[in-house]
Image: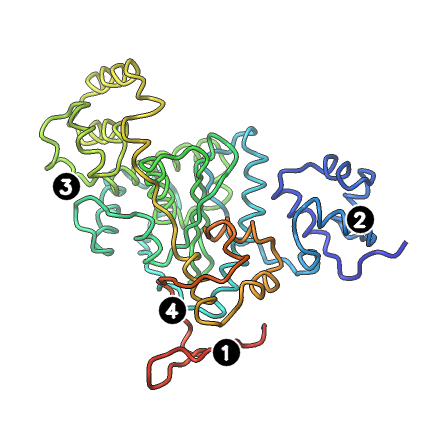
Amino acid sequence: MIGTPGFIGQRLAQVREARGLTGVALADLLQVDNTSISNYEKDRQSPTAKVMERMVDVLKVPPAFFLRPLRAEGKEFWWRSLSSATKSARSRAKARNMWLQEIISYLQEYLEFPKLNVPDFNLPDDVHKISTSDIEDIAMECRKVWRLGSGPIADTVLILENNGIIVSRGELGAETLDAYSQAGEDHQHPVIFLGADKATAARSRHDASHELGHLLLHRHVDPAKLRHPIYFKLIEEQAHRFASAFNLPALGFADQLWYPSIEAFLALKPHWKSSIAAMIVRCVQLDILSEEQARRMWIAMSRRGWRKQEPLDDRMAPEQPRLLRRSIELLVKEGVKTTDQILTDLALSAFDIESLACLDSGYLSYEPTNTFGMPQLRQDIYPKNGTDNVIRFALPRK
């Protein structure tokens, strides 16, 4: 039987993992034997036209997807959990992150993203040599570099994006996998992905700052240590401490806390956009509360049923990424690309592009009429004329 010329087996493995399928489950859906899936993925055999048709239908990707060369995987990931319970979710996230990187690279062919402005504090590669005072100082220094002062941050995700960090948000499929991040290669933009599975506004903000902590504190750590249980636990604790110090800076937060009580924390919650739980933890870190006082607060929180859901959680909206969404909207608005061309160029489903780029569902099926954009069209490709209008043309694909 004639196979599919140019078929890339690794693409099948990638989309299978992205859809959360085992080889056995996919074989059943495609009506082939189990060994065929392994042979396809290892390029020992390519699927027939009939099997390809089923692949496209079952896996919801266009045929061209299977013919595109893969990108290199890039640097290590910082995961919130390395447990066996999250292995499938990590594999799914990793596969989808490759698509996210493809979207980013595609957009950078036409757009200038905000300049990368992530300070390097030249920390040691041994995490045991990073002290708590180092973390507190780095959190404040980062705030200083980004001109945030010592008060509440209006929108953490926006601050990250404006300083060249790519942020996406979506379902991760595991309760303990709240977020992940990946440092960029030299001079490339890091990526932070925030889980939307059950994240409240306060928790999502902490997740974003936690991942920023990894990017600042652990960029020089040996990747092999990220998988070692002892190192992993300390690395996570350090990122949590950074998030606390970054979101609730010692001077600014303490100045506004008239008395450490659950009621006071509740009153400050919409102002600082941090959870009551996070404020209890921060007060212990700053010696405003003793461990015993905090323990009594945790008991009081449990009695009120606030350990699972706090007041205002249902009224505070999580911060949303904008950069990738506005980038695609800008390309379409300025006539550089149509939505159909974007779908063809990326060879991904509309659903996957929309979810990874945080576009409105259905956006790629129609042309929008207005947009606002942080990114700018690359001026080396799209120069402006005397009336400051963008010259509307698209270069051939590279």
Q: In the rendered structure, which amino acid carries the disc numbered 4?
A: Gln
Identify the element where label 4 is drawn: strand
Q: Earlier in the sequence, mark 4 or mark 2?
A: 2
> Mark 1 belongs to which amino acid?
Phe
Residue 134 is left or right of residue 359, and the answer is left
Q: Is residue 16 left or right of residue 110?
A: right
Mark 3 residue crowding within 10 angstroms, few (<14) / some (14–19) / many (20+): some
Q: Which of 163 and 386 lies nearest the eye of the viewer?
A: 386
- Nearest to the observer: residue 96 or residue 359: 359
Residues under labels 1 and 3: Cα distance?
Answer: 50 Å
Q: Mark 4 to mark 2: distance in Å?
A: 43 Å
Q: Are marks 1 and 3 in contact (CB under 8 Å)?
A: no
Mark 4 or mark 1: name the one nearer the start of the chain: 4
How many neighbours does mark 1 have within 10 angstroms: few (below 14), some (14-19), or many (20 or more)? few
Residue extending farthest right: 1
Q: Which residue is mark 1?
A: 393
Which mark lies nearer to you, 3 or 4?
4
Residue that label 4 marks: 376
Q: Is residue 201 above or below residue 359?
A: above
Q: Name the kind of residue labelled 3 in the image.
A: Gly
What residue sits 28% from the left and 39% below the top? 131
At 20% from the left and 55% from the top, the residue drawn is 147
Instruction: Kindly state the secondary structure of the residue where label 2 is placed.
Output: helix
- Where's residue 348, x and y in %? 60, 55
Give how far across and how far down residue 87 sits, in percent: 57, 34
The CA span between labels 1 and 2 is 39 Å
Query: Which of pointers 1 and 3 lies earlier in the amino acid sequence?
Result: 3
As drawn, the label of residue 51 is 2
Q: Which quadrant is the C terminus positioned in?
A: bottom right
Q: Which residue is mark 3?
A: 252
